Image: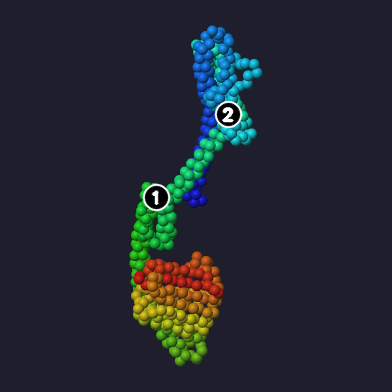
Amino acid sequence: MRLVLQLVARLLVIVALCLGAATVWATIDAYRSVDRATQASAERVSQSLEALYWRELLLRSNRMREQLLPAPDWRTIETMGLIAPGICVQFEPAGAFEKPLCGQSKGIGKAPPRWFAATVQMILGDHATVERPISARAATAGTVRAIADPDAAIALAWQHILDNIHVALLMALAIALLASLAIAHTLAPAHSIVSALRQMADGEYRTPLPRVRSMELAMIGRAVSDLGDRLALAEEERTVLTRRLLEIRNDERRTLARELHDEFGQNLTAILAFANTIEASAGDKYAAGTEIAQDARMISQATRRVMACLRDTLNRLRHPPAEELGLEASLVDLVDSWRSRTAQPMIQLDLQGDLADISGTVAATAYRVAQECLTNALRHSSAREIVLRIERRTGSENALLVRVEDDGGGDAAKVAQSAGFGLTGVSERVTALGGSLSIARASRGLSVAATIPLAA
């Protein structure tokens, strides 16, 4: 899962928890607000009735206090305006058939769900009754008793919760949206870092990264840049060491070729001369076809075969002809030499582009690749046709492509895993020049392709 989505999901969980906590708080506050409204209504009505009580007492001083109770004309519109919606007030002692005076409860809110009313009633309990005396100086003046209407109180609390929750929900959605945009904007440089890592995996180690403001992402970017610099330096050092290794190997090849030519070549020539002499002498002394003459003739034939193998080995060990004849002429000579040895498979040479100015290490490496791939195709497959294609690519690529395809079947994955010293050697040569070697499945066989940069 993407990091942005993870952070947004966690943010939504936090917002949901906060919204749930706000809902619980709003429920408790709404329920308690009814108690506060009950107390306020009782206070206001008691103060109003106290003023009414003392006014009547002063205006009608010839009457007894008992004749003033209950206070006259207290159930007025002004008194109802002092009572909060959903609250009922009753005067004690109450008159005959007197009902509580209740505040307006119609339209104060929607009817709440039954589960909400039952839950609130079970957890928070009933509303308390509030009593206030009309006058502290006259204990017999009466008492105001206020109590909340249960149905109206629940409806009022539900409406209060809905109002708060709507605001809280809009704020939560706004916070989630803005925070998601901020998180996405903050983590946007991570895409550049991932892209740089992929380019590094492809060999582009010194990939510049954009500057970021986030300290953590900046630290990661610097670490990636430092890693790329170290990998680039290690790659340069490896290339230098590989080229030096190839130079040492070429020197060893030349030394070995010289030793083989000087030692084995002369000894084989001497053995061939001795065998010819023995064969001639045996033919003169004895009769032709004697065992000694036959043995000498067999020695001569074996010596000639060893000398032919030695010449072929010396040709492979010495400098490739590409350094002397040029790449195109050396490839034509290579294909002609294989054609002269065997009629099957048929070898085709396809040259594309101008190869005249390709020389030096690039030409020698291309020749070695073609030589090794042709040798493997001829020795290890039952191909009937082999195509050697040399293509010079210009423009941004500026590279030389060497491809050998055959129709002899084979498993590319197994060949790549079990590559011998020959393919390993040419792969090291190509890699040392900054190129690449690949073994893939062709239409009817295998395809070995090497890409060698011409700027090497």
Q: Is residue 430 above or below residue 34?
A: below
What amino acid type should be assigned to the residue bearing mark 2? Gln
Q: Secondary structure at mark 1?
A: helix
Q: Is residue 93 above or below residue 231?
A: above
| Mark closest to the chain's N terminus, 1 or 2 | 2
Q: Looking at this view, is 416 or 15 the one in front?
A: 15
- Can you tell which of label 1 and label 2 is closer to the viewer? 2
Q: Position of residue 145 (x, y in %)?
A: 57, 19
Label 1 Cα crowd, 10 Å radius (few <14 / some 14-19 / many 20+) = some
Label 2 Cα crowd, 10 Å radius (few <14 / some 14-19 / many 20+) = some
Q: Position of residue 49 (x, y in %)?
A: 53, 18
Q: Position of residue 209 (x, y in %)?
A: 37, 56
Does the rendering let one see residue 346?
Answer: yes
Q: Looking at this view, is 57 or 196 the one in front?
A: 57
Q: Which residue is mark 2?
A: 104
Q: Which residue is mark 1?
A: 217
Q: Position of residue 18 (x, y in %)?
A: 50, 38
Task: Using residue 403 as the reference point, say whether residue 322 is left or right of it.
Answer: left
Q: Residue at x 49, y 81 (%)?
A: 347
- State the count of labels: 2
Q: Residue at x 41, y 85 (%)?
A: 273
Does the rendering let one see residue 371?
Answer: no
Q: Secondary structure at mark 2?
A: loop
